[in-house]
């Protein structure tokens, strides 16, 4: 957007002391990601979370691009400020000189600046005004996109979302309480979609990785869940959370950091004791959460 206006880049940008950028005006939130799904089945909910996880990456790239353009504009304004500063220094000196002279000779100070100097200075000033307008727009856009820029990609290991004992692993199981499932193209009569961590009632449940809360609510079986989308097409589900004295502390649309407490261990839904059911999808496909956790 800015590229090509000036070619002063490459030199270190001086501080913009005399000309601070105007504060950004309010702009509408960026389009793209609805905070909540419009309802529907469990499958539709997971699918919605998958789309959100994918969109998060795109929005983050957009946030980075806009910030880079804004910084570019800032550097150009700074360069122009330095350049326009020189003629004005000359002009100021001439004006001071003229004032001193005018005290005795009555020569108007305006005549002491050559028309060429004034024209060049005016041209630089109008260019700077134009750049500042662009800067203000870009800054406003960058502010609107800021929530996406701060979502760190879950590069490192994920955190265990609850302190406790692993009571059931991921995958095929003989436990008849688990529904059937298809994994890797294979049908299983009983398949555990995540891992279970047995823990103290009301003990904290934390976000396993940074991300954006997609949904908080009850599944049809009564389980209170929090669903989080992560950069990289990943989605995490936290289930059987308490919905009584320690309900979830987050809402759809919230950005969460790794380790942030999102809810408390509970017994909502079909469960024989307090535990967390933790499931993870990558691009809509279930994966073993333990493959992401540090041990
Ligand atoms: Zn489970």
Image (spheres, rainbow, N blue to C red):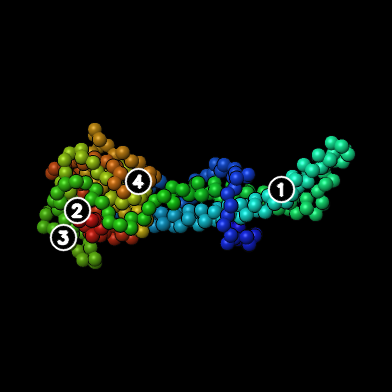
Q: Position of residue 18 (x, y in %)?
A: 63, 44
Mark carried by residue 172: 3
Q: Position of residue 163 (x, y in %)?
A: 19, 46
Cα distance in 3D space between marks 3 and 1 = 78 Å
Q: Is residue 239 above or below residue 66?
A: above
Which of the two discs, 1 and 4, labels the residue nearer the N terminus?
1
Earlier along the polypeptide chain: callout 3 or callout 1? 1
Q: Quadrant of residue 287?
A: bottom left
Query: Does the beta carbon of the residue at mark 1 sit less than 8 Å from ligand 1?
Result: no
**Left or right of residue 129, residue 267 in this image:** left
Q: Secondary structure at mark 4?
A: strand
Q: Nearer the viewer, residue 79 or 223?
A: 79
Q: Which mark is residue 89?
A: 1
Which marked residue is nearer to the observer: mark 4 or mark 3?
4
Residue identified by numbered label 2 = 195
Q: CA distance from mark 4 to mark 2?
A: 21 Å
Query: Which residue is at 56% across, 43% downward?
Result: 24
Q: Quadrant of residue 270?
A: top left
Q: Is residue 38 left or right of residue 195?
A: right
Q: Label 1 to label 2, Cα distance in Å? A: 70 Å
Q: Residue at x 27, y 37 (%)?
A: 247
Q: Residue at x 80, y 54 (%)?
A: 116
Q: CA distance from mark 4 to mark 3?
A: 31 Å
- Does the image show residue 218? no
Quadrant housing the N terminus: bottom right
Q: Secondary structure at mark 3?
A: strand
Disc 2 CB within 8 Å of nearest ligand 1 atom: yes
Dot 3 crowding, Cα within 10 Å, few <14, some 14–19, many 20+: some
Q: Which residue does the numbered mark 4 point to in the structure image?
A: 256
Task: Give the percent coordinates (x, y) of residue 12.
Answer: 57, 57
Label located before the other in sequence (4 or 2): 2
Q: CA distance from mark 2 to mark 3?
A: 11 Å
């Amino acid at each position: 957007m800015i590229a090509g206006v000036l070619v002063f880049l490459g030199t270190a940008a001086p501080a913009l002391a005399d000309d601070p950028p105007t504060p950004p005006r309010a702009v509408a939130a960026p389009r793209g990601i609805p905070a909540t799904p419009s309802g529907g089945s469990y499958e539709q909910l997971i699918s919605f979370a998958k789309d959100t996880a994918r969109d998060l990456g795109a929005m983050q790239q957009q946030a980075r691009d806009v910030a880079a353009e804004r910084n570019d504009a800032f550097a150009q304004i700074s360069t122009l400020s330095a350049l326009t500063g020189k003629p004005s220094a000359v002009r100021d000196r001439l004006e001071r000189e003229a004032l001193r002279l005018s005290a005795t000779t009555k020569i108007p100070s305006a005549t002491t600046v050559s028309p060429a100097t004034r024209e060049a200075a005016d041209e630089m000033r109008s260019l700077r005004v134009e750049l500042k307008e662009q800067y203000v727009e870009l800054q406003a856009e960058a502010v609107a996109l800021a929530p996406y820029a701060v979502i760190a990609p879950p590069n490192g290991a994920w955190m265990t979302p609850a302190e406790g004992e692993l009571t059931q692993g991921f995958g095929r199981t003989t436990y008849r309480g688990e529904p059937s499932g298809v994994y890797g193209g294979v049908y299983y009569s009983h398949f555990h979609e995540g891992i279970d961590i047995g823990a103290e009632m009301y003990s904290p449940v934390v976000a396993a990785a940074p991300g954006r809360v997609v949904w908080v609510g009850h599944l049809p079986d009564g389980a209170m869940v929090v669903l989080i989308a992560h950069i990289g097409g990943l989605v995490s589900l936290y289930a059987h959370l308490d919905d009584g004295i320690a309900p979830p502390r987050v809402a759809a649309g919230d950005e969460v950091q790794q380790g942030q407490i999102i809810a408390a261990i509970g017994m909502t839904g079909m469960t024989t004791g307090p535990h967390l059911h933790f499931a993870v999808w990558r691009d809509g496909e279930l994966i073993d959460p333990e493959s992401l956790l540090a041990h």
